[in-house]
Image (tube, rainbow, N blue to C red):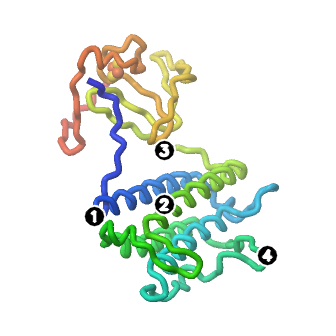
Amino acid sequence: MDAEREILELEPIAEDPEVGRWLAAMRDTRRDTIRELERVSPDSLDRTPAGEENSIGTLLYHVALVEADWLLADILGPEAAPPWPNDLLPFGDRDADGHLTDVSGMTLDRHTERLDLVRSMFLDHLRPMTSEEFHLLRRRERWDVSPAWVVHHLLQHEAEHRAQIVRLRDALGAVPSTDVQIRVRPNGSYKVYGEVSVLDPQDVPFDLTGRRKRDPYGERIKLCRCGASRTMPFCDDSHVETEFCSVPSAATPSGLTDGEG
Ligand code: FES
């Protein structure tokens, strides 16, 4: 029994499983981007630290514009694309010198709303595709390109700009994370994500150095839920030896009794 094992899989979000998995990968990437944006302080959106060329606001606009452009110009093409959404994306991508157009004076909400609207337009066109259509090459002025390649490119593009945004965010002073999440593992520990301290009964903090590990959901510590750990209150995987069985469900209320201990 390997109770702590995570299941890392892409559940298709379109009728055709192959198309659906690629689109799920896009959703996953966007989730990571939004998670990183949560710690961007509002006054750092339009600032560009020394040594950097673009602000976070400029990069967010660019990510949305590139997604819309690949959809309209390359996947749909002049024969099928609706008009360019000027209300949403009023500026061109680059200035006369080839630099990204500086985009400032917008709130983070406005930027994320634009990302959402472009994504929903993208999904409206990609979701109904069969895998044959997804791999069909479109003949464009500069290249022949398939929707599958576009999705692959957009995944890379967003991930690279997310790394840039995180670097800018941290250089400009990220908002400290206050979000704490506890994931109850089936037949296993409590995984605690976020900035937490663990105090003993005398209110002395445990040293968490070496106990924080990164997994796909962030950085976490593991607290024992089975009672068998030799390193209480932390999980040392003794639950595997003892074959601890407990799979609580939020859908099944377990009563509201809250002891004093
Ligand atoms: S839950 Fe892992 S040792 Fe108790």
In this rendering, position of residue 222 left or right of residue 112: left
> Which residue is under mark 2?
152
> What's the residue at 43%, 33% (across, down)?
192
Image x and y of residue 65, in percent: 57, 73
In this rendering, position of residue 62 left or right of residue 255: right
Q: Quadrant of ligand 1?
A: top left
Which mark is in front, 2 or 3?
A: 2
Image x and y of residue 241, in percent: 28, 14
In this rendering, position of residue 8 left or right of residue 244: right
Query: Sequence order check: which comes first, mark 4 or mark 1?
Result: 1
Question: What is the distance, in whole Å, between disc 2 and disc 3 at their CAs?
Answer: 31 Å
Question: What is the distance, in whole Å, between disc 4 and disc 3 at their CAs?
Answer: 42 Å
Image x and y of residue 149, in percent: 48, 64
Q: Which quadrant holds the C terminus? A: top left
Question: What is the distance, in whole Å, between disc 4 and disc 1 at their CAs?
Answer: 43 Å
Q: Which quadrant holds the N terminus? A: top left
Looking at the picture, tell me which residue is in the foreground, 55 or 248: 55
Q: Which mark is residue 179?
A: 3
- What amino acid is labelled 3 in the image? Asp
> Which residue is under mark 4?
97
SS label for mark 2: helix
Question: What is the distance, in whole Å, between disc 4 and disc 2 at their CAs?
Answer: 28 Å
Q: Residues within 10 Å of mark 1 (few under 14, many from 20)?
A: some
